[in-house]
Structure formats: C-alpha cells, structure tokens
Amino acid sequence: MLRNGSNLGLNQRMVLLGLLFLVLISTFLEAGYGQVNTYLLNCGSTDSIVDANGRRWVADSSGENFTLSDNGTAVSSVTVEDNSIYQSLYKTLRVFNSSAYYSFNVSPGSYCIRLHFYPFSAGSLNINDSVFDVTANELRLVSQFNVPVEILCWNSRMNEVHNSLIKEYFLNVSSNELKIKFVPSVTSFAFVNAIEITEVMNNMFVDAATKVGTKEKLPFSLNEHGIETMYRLNVGGPALEPGKDRDLWRKWDPDDNFMFSANAAIAISNRSNISYSSLNASSIAPLLVYETARIMSDNEVVEKRFNVSWRFLVDPNFEYLIRMHFCELVYDKQNQRIFRIYINNKTAAEEYDVYLQARGMNKAYHEDFSDVLSRQIDTLWLQLGPEPSVGPSGIDAILNGVEIFKLSKNGSLAHVSERISINEEGVSTKKTKSKVLWAATGIGASVVTISIACVFLLHHVRKRKADSVKEDPSSWRPLFVHATMASTTNAAAKSPLINNGLPAPNRTGRRFTLAEIRVATSNFDESLVIGTGGFGKVYKGEIDDGILVAIKRGNPQSQQGAAEFETEIEMLSKLRHRHLVSMIGFCDEQKEMILVYEYMANGTLRSHLYGTSQPALSWKQRLDACIGAARGLHYLHTGAEWCIIHRDVKTTNILLDGDFVAKMADFGLSRAGPSLDHTHVSTAVKGSFGYLDPEYFRRQQLTQKSDVYSFGVVLFEVVCARPVINPSLPKDQSNLAEWALRWQRQRSLESIIDPKLDGDYSLESLRKFGELAEKCLADEGKNRPNMGDVLWHLEYVLHLHEAYRKSREGDSFGSTELGFTDVPFSLPFVREGDEEHVS
Ligand SMILES: *[C@@H]1O[C@H](CO)[C@@H](O)[C@H](O)[C@H]1NC(C)=O
Ligand SMILES: *[C@@H]1O[C@H](CO)[C@@H](O)[C@H](O)[C@H]1NC(C)=O
C-alpha cells in the first residue's frame, strides 16, 4: 500500500510516525520493565503449574535459560496445609545433600529474589533436620538456616500461624549470571520449594535516605548493599495479596500486630483518585497502599500529647532502611497536619507536612530513612508524634504504609552464625536445652528473648545433628509433621469431629510413649504432683535429660475428659503465642490422655497472691502478670484463625514461668467463638464459680465478653489478694466481685486492697486499674471493653506507675516517653460495630 513517502498525505505520515513511536516506546518499556528477566521455578517438580494469579511456574528440571548443577532429590507431598495462593507450588520441594546451584541467564540490573519454603517430612526425610546456607552471586542470604525455626520466629513476630515462609531479597547483578547456591551444613541437607526472580525497575532503591538522628540525606544504592525485606505493611488497611500488586507480586500485611497501643490511632480510607506525586514514585508501591492510613485517634477531651508507635522485631547489628509511604487523604491545603517522625527514639524528621512534601492532596509519596541497630538491640521503633512548635495543626499525624529492609553488611544478610558462636561458648548444655524447648513450643519467649530463643533452638538443631546417632529419631518432631504418608492422612481423616464446632483435630507435637512418660514422672510418683483438677493430676516431670515439663494425666474414665483432651491438643497445636502455655506433646497410648507442657516454674498466679507462704508480688509484678494474661486472651479472641473463648479465666489458669512471664493455660473448656453471622454461641454453662459472667449464666450464650467479665474478677483478685468466693466471710463480703465493685463505685478501692502492697504503688494507677476492673464487670457484655481495650488500659496503668516510681527516684523520666501523656480514660469502650446484638 505504501509505495513511497511522497505519496503519503500529512495525516498518514503523522499516523506512521505515531506508530513508530509506539513501537519504540513499547520496546523501551519492555527492556526497562525487564519482563523477559523473570523466572518462576516450581522446584522438585516435573510439571509446570499455573498459580491462582495466573502466573506460570515452570518445573525446575526443565532448564530453559537456567541450569541446575545437581538434581538433588525431588520430594512431593500428598497434602498441603497452607491456604496461600501458592498452595499448589508447595506440593513439591527439591532436596540437596551437597552444595548445588541454580544458574540463571539474566541481563545486568536490579533483581528481586524470593525463596519459598514449605517444610514437610516424607519417608525418611525429617525436614526439621535441614540446616543450610544460601547465597545469590556474592551475597550471602542466610546462614545455618533452619526453616521450621525461622517459621516459628516469623509467626511469633507476626503473631500469626503460618506453615510456609517466603524470604525476599533485592540485589544488583552486574554480569549475565545470577547464581543461587544452596550449601547444606555438614551431615545435613538443604531444600527449597520455589524460586522467584523478577527484574525490578532501577528506581526501586535510588532515593537518598535520611540518616536518623542527623539531617543528612545520604545517597543509597543497591550497588553497595543487598537488601532483605523484613516487613511490608499496609498501614490502616487490610492485607494486600500479591495479586493486588502486579508489578512485583508483593504481599502487604496489615499493621495491627505491630502497633504498640492500638487505640492511639484510628484507620481511615479514601478511595478517590490518588495518584503518584512523581513519575519516580510509581511502581514503588501500588496505589491501594495509599488509600488507607492511620491518623491519631481523636480523643477530644485533652490536647493530643502522645505518639502513635509501632515496634518491629529485627536482627541486631544491622543497618535498616525504613521506607514510609505517605498520602494526605483529608486536607486539601498545607499546614493542616504537621508531625514529627521518630525512629528508635531519635528524631528522624521534624515539622513533617505530607501535603507539602507530596505537593498536594491524594498524592502518593514515600520517604526513606536509615538507622543502624547495635548488637543488643532487636527492636525497631517507629513513632509519629506531635509537633509542639506549630500549634493546633501539630497534633495529628498520618501514615499509609511502611517497609523495613535490612541492609547487608560485609556481603551478608545472614544473622544467625555470629550469635550461635557466642552461645556455643557461653551456655551450658542443660540450660540450652531447656531454653530450646521453651522456644520450640513457640510461645515461651518474651519479646526480648524470642530472637535469642530462636538461636538457642538453632543451636539445638545443630547439636542434634551431631548427636543424631545415639538419639531416638522421634524425639524431635514437634513442629512440622505435615502428613505425607498415607497412614497419617488416614488417621487424621478418621478422627471424629468434636462437638465444639471446630474441624477434626489436627495434632501436631511430639507423641510420647507411655514408657517415656513413666520414666519422666518416676511412674506417676505422687510426690511429683503439682496440681489436681477436674481433668486429673498434673505432675512435674523431666524429659530428654533435664528438660522440666508439666505432665497432665487425664482420667481415662471421663467421657467429658476425652472431648476436652482432643480440644486441648487441637487448640494448643494451632495456638502459638508467648502468653499461652505451650504444649510440647501428648501421649495417647493405651487410652491414656496425657498432655505434656512447658514447665512453668513459678506456678499459678493465685499461689503468689494468697493462701501460700510465697513472698508477695509487687504492684508492678502484678500489673505485668495481668498484662501478660490479657495479651494471651486478646490473642485467643482476635489473633487465631477462629475467635476462641477461653471460658475459664481465673488466677489458677494464669501461670508464671521462671521469669514471672504470665501465660494463659488450660484450654480444655475453650471453644470457637461466634463466627461472622452469629454473635454468640449457645452452650451449657461451664466455668468456675465466682468468675462467671452473669449474662452468660442467665442466657447461656457465650461471647468474648464473658472472658472479659472473668478477667475483671481476676483484676480485683490481684489487687485485693483474697479468694473470689469466701463463704466464711459475712454474706455481703463473700463474693469478691460484688464486694470489690461496691468499694470501687464509691471510689475507695484503696481501702480494701492487699495490705502487702504496702503503699508501694501510684494511687493514680490504682484508680485507673479499679475503673478498668469495674468496666469489665459491667452487667451487659456490650458495655464491657474488649480485650484489646483492656490491654491498652493496663499498659497505661503500668506506665502511670512506672512514671510515678521514676519520679520518686528523682529520675527525670517523664510520663511522655512511650506516648501515653495524659490519655483520658474516656476512650470509648464500645466502638461502633463492636456491639453484640444478643438475640
Ligand atoms: C545497580 O542498581 C542501581 C540502582 O538501582 C543502578 O543504577 C545500577 O545501574 C545497577 N548496577 C548494575 C551493575 O546493574
Ligand atoms: C514520642 O517519642 C519520642 C521518642 O521516643 C519521645 O522523645 C517523645 O517525647 C515522645 N512524645 C510524646 C508526646 O510522648
């Protein structure tokens, strides 16, 4: 049609030029976006699969543009207990018994690597025994890596329960090869389920980052560092699955679990045309992230003088890049919302006005900061606070998203090796072992110690490798026994659906033989009994040469006991939280119903309050115990897959470990709470007299608020140190809840508190504490706070007390440090949509 240029009209030439331009642009874009440099490998498989997002993962044995140095062993599993979009990918993995690598043909540039791990054991392969290193070209990604342990650590960081782990890295590749190398530890093996490699736009990590504590902005580049993604949060919004972030298929988690005090901020959203503030900002994060945010909660009564705080557990001794995503969703001019940003208690930015930075409303914008954590510090704090210098506009803040990246140091992102070597010298075996179990069960450790505990556990794994010849192979499989062998699968299928609305039991944990239990308890020696209850007796025992445990032996005759036994195994298998007592295993040989728990050295909370000769707990210790228990309950109510109502909250079900960390125990009566379409569950009344929610008693309808009521009774018990029912007292005093409530309503709780507190408490904190207990005991569930509110108020009470103590010690420590200054007590207890409509 086109013979030569001169025959074309002006319009046709324009069209032609336009077309040419389009072709050029698209070629350019293709190169720039690097779609060609994407590899998705389904490891250990001979089949390619297409995931829920339509992405195709090729079999790693196919070798198109990549090579696999050593085929290792392909292993597959029948069942996958992971409901992520990658479920179908996790059916197979590849095991390497000696070092091996995948080598990919790539063009030089920046890459995102994701390694997917879904540990399962099959045949003679015990996945808990795998320990390995991974490198990508020159960059060390992990060292002495044990996936089950890492999953535990990750779950405890996220306060969630996952069976899989995705590690994400960014690095520059200067050659045409990207080599991912797996190196198993001596006598161990390495494995991987899937590998994802995507070229990323060169603008991902180019912005200068402000060095926290200085005003300096230093250029940042991937040329100098490799990066590991630690956290990626959609602040104030829901989780965004990878399908919502189609450039990089990243997952954005909600921020709730990282907020220091959830009530300090509220979530807002705005879905109106948000756009990127600059061309360079696009592809940094999807616009969805900017549509939701948190702002300071509006407490109307007093001026807002507190910080909104998030805290993150990270690896010590690394530098971090903190990327904050902002978008002003409310104000359409500058000078309306001005705040300060603090990172690790240091000022990162002052007079921060998002509108001004982004040059407009609804403009997506990000800002990078960097800070180095020292050797002992494993918590990264992010705080937004008021800007006193600017008056009324300086009392609100906003944040839409945050990412925390770890930067490599001396070519390595691995964090364990160094700490392990410290432990190998400094810790005796016995101590190590008990700590190990403590961590192995996933719950034991407090915030500060969890990462250390993870190391202990790793140490144990390595040690076990060395000892494995003489040890019984069954003695270490508490964590991942994903059923792959037909027998196990059948066993699970046959177990009955127990009558508490939960699916059939899914037992994890070590299965002890009766013989082992007999050895551990010197054949159920009566002198080792540390508790008795409706269920049976609890013995102190010792397993594996020195690990103390609590062994609960059910009465085999009890039908109810059997149901509760199943419930407890199942609940405890699923629930992992540092404020819930953890189960180590069970024994069901010869119709026995035996549960093995971590040993709680300091026994029940009650035994430290009255009726024994134990020294009295200080006010702070009591508050700490209440806070710990509240955390455990809050997790039961909100953190697990189902809402779980404990049903038997009392001071004998709150146990204290060797460091007086409080944990909730005894889930035998627990049951799944109301699902979305029901606001309560009807059930026969169970629980303990003196703690029972009157509403539950009247209506036999159970909600989380029944636990809140019982917890209110616990609060009074903790401060008054007397039994909840004492028939020997005059009638009007025999019931603690009624009696204490009367005094509290007259605002004279201090007249009836435990004399052993001996004036060593701040009166203000006691008042708030009393008000909180009173709220918990409200007649109707809907007027009671939820556990999240209870927790927040208890933390506030503790803070008041600490501030008082410091001021008495003449310390300059104010009550401002954690952002609690003068928080009024009038925070709404019942929030909208929080009400139960009891039918
Ligand atoms: C490394 O990354 C930076 C920034 O992303 C980019 O400018 C540079 O070209 C990259 N270097 C190589 C060798 O690809
Ligand atoms: C907010 O946190 C910072 C750093 O931890 C602290 O210095 C400041 O006093 C806090 N501000 C308020 C109002 O609590």
Image (spheres, helix red, strand yellow):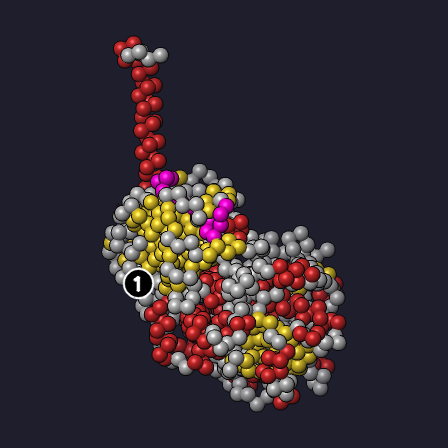
Point out residue 116 in the picture as x, y percentages from the top left corner: 45, 54
- Residue at 51 percent across and 83 percent down: it is 546
The answer, for residue 610, to whether it is visible in the render is yes
Residue 239 magenta: no
Residue 697 relative to residue 814: left or right: right
Residue 44 magenta: yes
Image: magenta residue range: 34-47
Point out residue 739 in the picture as x, y percentages from the top left corner: 66, 77
Q: Is mark 1 within 8 Å of ligand 2?
A: no
- Above/below status of 414 relative to 557: above
**Residue closest to the far top:** 7
- Residue at 43 percent across and 74 percent down: it is 466
Q: Quadrant of residue 137?
A: bottom left
- Residue at 50 percent across and 56 percent down: it is 75
Q: Nearer the viewer, residue 805 or 224?
A: 224
Point out residue 163 in the picture as x, y percentages from the top left corner: 52, 59
Residue 309 relative to residue 721: left or right: left
Mark 1: which secondary structure? strand
Point out residue 292 in the picture as x, y percentages from the top left corner: 46, 48
Q: Amino acid at mark 1?
A: Val
- Image quadrant where one finds the C terminus: bottom right
Q: Quadrant of residue 769?
A: bottom right
- Residue at 33 percent across and 15 percent down: it is 12
Q: Nearer the viewer, residue 542 or 598?
A: 542
Residue 213 relative to residue 241: left or right: left
- Above/below status of 403 relative to 518: above
Q: Nearer the viewer, residue 235 or 713?
A: 235
Q: Which residue is mark 1?
A: 372
How many numbered badges does the structure rendering display?
1
- Image quadrant where one finds the N terminus: top left
